Image (spheres, helix red, strand yellow):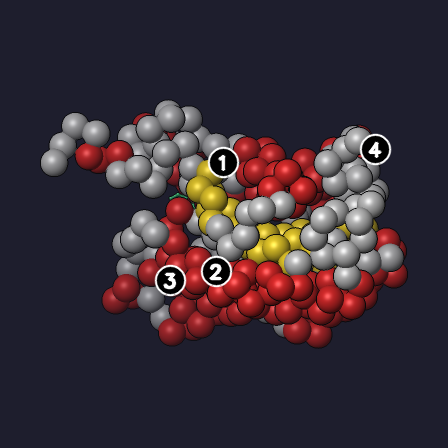
Amino acid sequence: MKKLENQTAIITGSSSGIGQGIAIEMAKEGANICINYLSSEEGAEETQEEIEKVGGKSIIVQADTSKPKEVSNMFEQTIKAFGTVDIVVSNAGVQKDASFLDMSIDDWKSLIDINLNGQFICAKEAAKEFLRRGIVEERSKAAGKIICMSSVHDIIPWGGHINYATSKAGILMFVKTLAQELGKHKIRVNALSPGAIKTKINEEVWKDEESREKLLELIPYQRIGEPEDIGKAAVWLASDDSDYVQGQTIYVDGGMTLYPGFSDNG
Ligand code: BGC
C-alpha cells in the first residue's frame, strides 16, 4: 500500500520549486493534491501534468495565503472535490532581500504577512477541518498533519535577509507551540527546514559557477539539494511512519547547519 493512499493534501505554493516537488512526491504515494498558486497558473498546470503522469488526482486553486477568505475558499474547494483534507503543507513563501538599512517597512511587513501570518491562517483552517472530521483509521493514525515550511535560516542568521530569517525563526516556535497545543487532538505539527535547494528563489546563486562554488563551501555533503529531497522528507512527515514525531523541525540541508566554517578553523 502507498504511504498516503486516499489522503488529501493541500500544498500551498505548489506551482514551482519545493512546493511542486512535494506535490509530485505525495501524489506518487497516493495522495490527492490541491495545487495552490498565487500568480503562476502555468506553473500550477505543469505540476498537474506531472501528477497525472504518476497516476495522481489534483485540483488547482488560486489563493493568496495571507488572506483568510481566500484560504477558506481553497479548503472549501478541496473538500468539495475530495471530501476532506488530511495533510496541509504550508509552503508558500517569498524572499524580499535588502540590507537592513535599505529594507523598507513594506518589504518587512509584506514578507511577514506571507511567510508567517500566511502559515498561521493555513494551520488554523487545517486544524478546524481535522477536528471536524477526527481520525479515520483506515487512512492514518492521526486526525491530521500540518507541515510548515521553514528554512535553515530559522537558526542561521542571514545578513541582507533579516525579514526572511526572522519569519522563519518565528515558524520554529510556531510549530513547537502549535504541536504542544494540538497534540491532544491527535493533530501532528512539524516543520521542514531546507538548506540550499535548486529553485527559482536562489537561481542567481546556483546558476553562476563562481557563486555556486562559494555556496558549496557551506554544504558539507557537497551538493545542492533538489525539490525531490524535500518532497521525500515531506512524505515521511505526513505518513504514519513518523507518527510519534511531534513539534519537530527537521533540517534537510546536506549539513548546512553544522557550522562548516569550523571544519578547519576555530
Ligand atoms: C533560501 C535560499 C537559500 C537557502 C540557503 C533558503 O531558505 O530561500 O535562497 O539558498 O535558504 O541559504
**Res. 176 mark:** 2
Secondary structure found at label 2: helix
The amino acid at mark 4 is Gly
Question: Above or below — where is 250 with respect to 94?
Answer: above
Q: Which residue is mark 1?
A: 198
Q: Earlier in the sequence, mark 1 or mark 2?
A: 2
CB under 8 Å between discs 2 and 4: no
Secondary structure found at label 1: loop
The amino acid at mark 1 is Lys
Viewer-nearest of discs 1 and 2: 2
Q: How far apart, in angstroms, are the residues tagged by discs 1 and 2?
A: 28 Å
Report whether the residue tagged 3 is closer than 8 Å to ligand 1.
no
**Res. 166 mark:** 3
Secondary structure found at label 3: helix
Q: How far apart, in angstroms, are the residues tagged by discs 1 and 3?
A: 22 Å
Q: Which residue sits at x=58%, y=56%?
A: 189
- Location of the N terminus by quadrant is top right
Q: Is residue 231 visible?
A: no
Q: Which residue is mark 4?
A: 55
Circle 1 packing at 10 Å, graded few (<14), some (14-19), many (20+), is some
Q: How far apart, in angstroms, are the residues tagged by discs 3 and 4?
A: 39 Å
Q: Is residue 174 left or right of residue 133?
A: left
Q: How far apart, in angstroms, are the residues tagged by discs 1 and 4?
A: 26 Å
Secondary structure found at label 4: loop
Q: How far apart, in angstroms, are the residues tagged by discs 2 and 4?
A: 35 Å
The amino acid at mark 3 is Thr
